[in-house]
Amino acid sequence: MSEIRLAAETRTEFGKGAARRARRAGFVPGVVYGHGHAPVHLNLPGHDLMMALKTPNALLVVPIEGKDEYVLPKAVQREAIKRTIEHVDLLLVKRGEKVTVEVPVHTEGELAPGGNLLEHVLQALPIEAEATHLPEAVTVSVEGLEAGASIHAKDITLPNGVALAVEADAVVLQVIAAQAAPAEEEATEAEGAEA
């Protein structure tokens, strides 16, 4: 995963009024915490932050006290209607540090014929990896799976240096038989209605 550099500014004003002024100027208020440091309040460029957060678990580089630091998005607050970013909490991380995050589960391939449905029991897989080497997603093949089949966390091939942060037997995906009413019952109901 590549790092995304954001030109953040230290915030000196706090409260709703200051946050509104920052948003009008195109910034998003944020706070960086972690590693025993006092929280650092920042204004981040709104558009650049929005683009960076399109990548799951984006590794951001922001200037803090004159030094570039790595941070991961921890919590993002969005406006209810427009979905614009209102505030972001960032977690300070160090190169080589292991962190636990959730990565999206993508599928490839076609299920066995028969109108079966694929259920994502876990939309995202909890993993532990080095903060500077987080995968963007994990891909699972569902080629030829039939109804009743399931894929557990232990069945997913992870990149080197990545470990599961969930029970190995946790179900991630399962195939469900299509729910269709038998044709005989429909015919019987139709005849009963005519009588």
Image (spheres, rainbow, N blue to C red):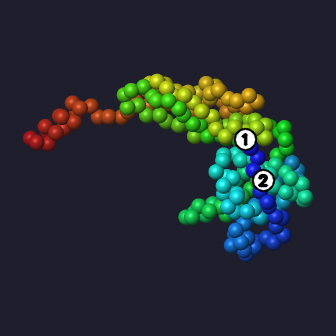
Residue linked to disc 1:
1
Callout 2: helix, strand or loop?
A: strand
Residue at screen point 86% across, 57% down = 64
Residue at screen point 79% across, 70% down = 14
Residue at screen point 85% across, 57% down = 63
Give the image location of residue 158, x and y in percent.
68, 29
Q: How many marks?
A: 2
Residue at screen point 54% across, 28% down = 141
Callout 2 amino acid: Arg
Callout 1 amino acid: Met
Label disc, if present, on residue 5 of the rendered structure:
2
Callout 1: helix, strand or loop?
A: loop
Give the image location of residue 190, x and y in percent.
16, 39
Give the image location of residue 26, x and y in percent.
70, 68
Residue 145 vertical position relative to residue 43 in the rendered view, above or below: above
Residue 118 visible within the image:
yes
Q: Between residues 26 and 40, which one lies in front from this camera angle?
A: 26
